[in-house]
Image (cartoon, rainbow, N blue to C red):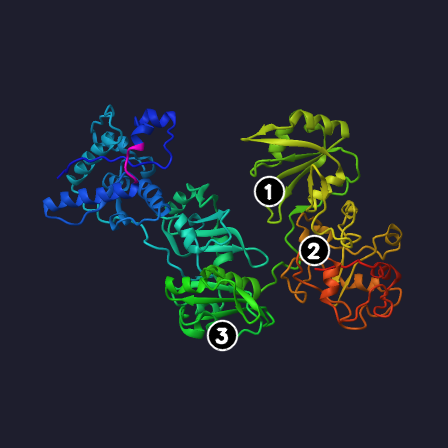
């Protein structure tokens, strides 16, 4: 039976209508301004359907929509954004396009179906002259459904589409198979986002159990990215359509990802972690900043009786370094949202002499922090994966102040070298061989910058004048003339702006050469002023040209067959919280250390503990604060001769007052 046709306009958040929308729909801002808000329209809809069913002596019903977009991509996200709940009928519905293809297998593919093509296949007429927007579509849908029900097909309208009520947490094993067609990467998330916040962003789409994996940076903190796994490729494709939708005031980028990437972040095989996460549908809270002496009883006492931990001590998981030392992090399980909220209210309360930070967490984050970050391998591998190959010897990166280079800023992130050459046009012939250098960020992704070495300063000037603010794809690109020295500063992590050069973060007084001339050699070597870090010593080489000439033979830093130019400055300068006992990626081969002490042939540090390494200093720390910190201890201010027996080269640096290297 066909009931009465009802139509209700929903008041839009933005009453501005495009010309195309006005033409197609016939709507006006004035008409929309008088419409009811969404929650009231849905309430009226429920009442109208219930009254019609009551006349028929029925009470239950299932919706049927033209495709899935209206239910999954409109109603669920909108109601989630406006913080009110949809009735149960919107969590189960029939997709008319799928049902039509099931009933008529010879019809067009589901993705190519629409109301008009389905009606034409059945030979039904469509009255598109109907002035009332949306009415002819609904009338035609009714005719299509009635025609389908008259067919002798038992497989239609039997298995409705479902929308999950809530996201289910759970662990993921590294041995599990994850289809790459079901995974996306979300970028630009607020750092405090939880898995529930991400599930809410994708409201209406079915995320797989334990399918939200928050990505962490090298310091174990969230980096604003997450990998999300959906139940099938159809849901993943719908998720990709939410690219640049907003979470609060921030737009979120959504890209395809692979199952391998998801397992790398979310997968784990630790028995301890698996046992901790075996209790499903628990709310996980991460505690950070715990005293290293804190016990399970201390944590339970801190949380108190108002937020009982699931299983007592079994609901606590302390994170430790490979050598068993505590990291100050712990994960806690709570059986319900109420207990978790009570725990979050204790954010930055004091335990012992330290304030404790509490955040929502996920099963994937537990796997990442406990297994992948602290309990297996160092945060940064011994030799980071190369990013850009060193230029062959005939085509070295230029140095000096001659402004024979140009900088391209604002490139599309998808731009490649071919795009740059096309952008340069006729000036391509004036580029030095192998003279195009793409600048990547520390994550190995395009930064939007590139440098090009031209054959002369005049050629660079002409290119800058001709190509500045020229369009590449859908973006205009800024082109500036610069020198080889300025190019090297940026390639090594520095910044170049109107106020001049800002050196790379690694360019501490004793850590960096002025021009990185080492990269002009056939085999990349350790920079002349880069620090040689050994487990017991930090020995900066001299910074004077005279001492450089007398320096021991250069030690190969990377093998000649795999020489690499790193724009990730952490190749020279370790970042916290790397343990000094586990990091070897800036350590020189033993021969280098032996060469540094050839003048005396004595151990580098005859007295253990003569040098100490400070970690976690505030960025604004100065000499006075450091000396005040060590007040009461004897330290060598100007003369290191009695403390360390070194060659003249090393001593010339160590004797320099106020030259401190703090990592």
The question of residue 514 being in magenta is answered with no
Quadrant of the drawing holding the C terminus: bottom right
**Tag in front: 3 or 2:** 3
Quadrant of the drawing holding the N terminus: top left
Q: Is residue 22 left or right of residue 488?
A: left
Task: Mark yes or no: residue 534 visible.
Answer: no
Q: Which residues are magenta?
A: 33-37
Give the percent coordinates (x, y) of residue 527.
Answer: 77, 52
Assess disc 2: are there few (<14), some (14-19) or many (≥20) residues with their C-alpha within 10 Å of its C-alpha. many
Q: CA distance from mark 2 to mark 1?
A: 22 Å
Q: CA distance from mark 1 to mark 3?
A: 45 Å
The earlier-in-sequence mark between 3 and 2 is 3
- Label 2's element? loop
What residue is shown with label 2? 573
What residue is shown with label 1? 446
Where residue 278 sits, quadrant-wise, is bottom left
Q: Residue at x 14, y 42 (%)?
A: 52
The earlier-in-sequence mark between 2 and 1 is 1
**Tag in front: 2 or 1:** 2
Q: CA distance from mark 3 to mark 2?
A: 36 Å
Looking at the image, residue 161 lies above or below residue 435: below
Assess disc 1: are there few (<14), some (14-19) or many (≥20) residues with their C-alpha within 10 Å of its C-alpha. some
Give the percent coordinates (x, y) of residue 620.
Answer: 68, 55
Q: Is residue 131 left or right of residue 223?
A: left
- Label 3's element? helix
**Tag in front: 1 or 3:** 3
What residue is shown with label 3? 296
Give the percent coordinates (x, y) of residue 435.
Answer: 71, 36
Query: Which secondary structure dominates the residues rendered in magenta?
Result: loop
């Amino acid at each position: 039976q066909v009931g009465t046709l009802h139509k209700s306009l929903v008041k839009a958040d933005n009453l501005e209508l495009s010309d195309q929308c006005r033409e197609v729909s016939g709507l006006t801002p004035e008409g929309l301004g008088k419409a009811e808000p969404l929650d009231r329209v849905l309430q009226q809809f429920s009442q109208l359907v219930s009254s019609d069913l009551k006349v028929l002596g029925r009470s239950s019903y299932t919706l049927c929509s033209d495709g899935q977009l209206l239910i999954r991509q409109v109603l669920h996200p909108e109601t989630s954004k406006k913080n009110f709940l949809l009735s149960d009928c919107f969590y189960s519905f029939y997709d008319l396009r799928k049902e039509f293809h099931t009933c008529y297998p010879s019809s067009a593919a589901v993705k190519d179906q629409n109301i008009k093509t389905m009606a034409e296949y059945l030979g039904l007429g469509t009255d598109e002259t109907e002035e009332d927007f949306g009415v002819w579509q609904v009338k035609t849908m009714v005719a299509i459904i009635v025609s389908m029900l008259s067919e002798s097909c038992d497989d239609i309208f039997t298995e409705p589409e479902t929308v999950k009520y809530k996201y289910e947490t759970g662990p993921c094993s590294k041995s599990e198979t994850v289809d790459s067609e079901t995974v996306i990467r979300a970028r630009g998330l607020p750092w405090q986002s939880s898995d529930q916040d991400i599930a809410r962003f994708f409201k209406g789409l079915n995320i797989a159990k334990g399918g939200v994996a928050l990505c962490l940076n090298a310091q174990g903190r969230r980096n604003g990215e997450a990998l999300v796994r959906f139940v099938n490729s159809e849901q993943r494709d719908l998720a990709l359509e939410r690219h640049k939708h907003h979470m609060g005031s921030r737009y979120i980028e959504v890209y395809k990802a692979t199952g391998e990437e998801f397992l790398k972040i979310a997968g784990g095989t630790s028995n301890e972690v698996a046992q901790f996460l075996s209790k499903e549908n628990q709310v996980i809270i991460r505690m950070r900043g715990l005293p290293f002496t804190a016990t399970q009883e201390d944590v339970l006492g801190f949380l108190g009786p108002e937020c009982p931990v699931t299983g007592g001590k079994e609901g606590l998981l302390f994170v430790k370094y490979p050598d068993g030392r505590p990291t100050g992090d712990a994960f806690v399980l709570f059986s319900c949202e109420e207990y978790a909220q009570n725990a979050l209210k204790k954010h930055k309360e004091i335990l012992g002499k330290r304030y404790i930070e509490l955040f929502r967490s996920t099963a994937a984050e537990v796997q990442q922090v406990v297994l992948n970050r602290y309990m297996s391998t160092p945060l940064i591998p011994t030799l980071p994966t190369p990013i850009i190959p060193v230029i062959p010897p005939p085509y070295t990166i230029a140095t000096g102040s001659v402004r024979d280079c140009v900088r391209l800023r604002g490139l599309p992130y998808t731009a490649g070298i071919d795009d740059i050459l096309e952008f340069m046009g006729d000036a391509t012939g004036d580029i030095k061989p192998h003279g195009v250098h793409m600048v990547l960020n520390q994550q190995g992704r395009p930064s939007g910058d590139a440098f090009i070495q031209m054959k002369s300063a005049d050629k660079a000037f002409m290119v800058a004048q001709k190509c500045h603010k020229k369009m590449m794809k859908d973006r205009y690109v800024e082109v500036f003339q610069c020198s080889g020295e300025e190019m090297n500063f940026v390639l090594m992590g520095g910044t170049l702006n109107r106020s001049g050069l800002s050196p790379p973060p690694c360019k501490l007084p004793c850590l960096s050469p002025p021009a990185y001339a080492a990269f002009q050699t056939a085999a990349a070597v350790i920079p002349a002023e880069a620090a040689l870090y050994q487990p017991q010593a930090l020995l900066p080489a001299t910074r004077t040209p005279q001492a450089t000439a007398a320096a021991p033979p250069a030690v190969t830093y990377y093998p000649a067959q795999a020489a690499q130019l790193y724009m990730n400055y952490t190749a020279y300068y370790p970042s916290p919280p790397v343990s000094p006992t586990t990091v070897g990626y800036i350590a020189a081969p033993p021969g280098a250390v032996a060469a540094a002490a050839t003048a005396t042939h004595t151990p580098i540090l005859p007295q253990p503990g003569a040098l100490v390494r400070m970690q976690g200093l505030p960025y604004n720390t100065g000499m006075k604060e450091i000396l005040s910190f060590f007040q009461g201890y004897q330290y060598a201010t100007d003369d290191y001769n009695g403390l360390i027996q070194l060659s003249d080269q090393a001593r010339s640096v160590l004797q320099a007052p106020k030259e401190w290297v703090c990592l």
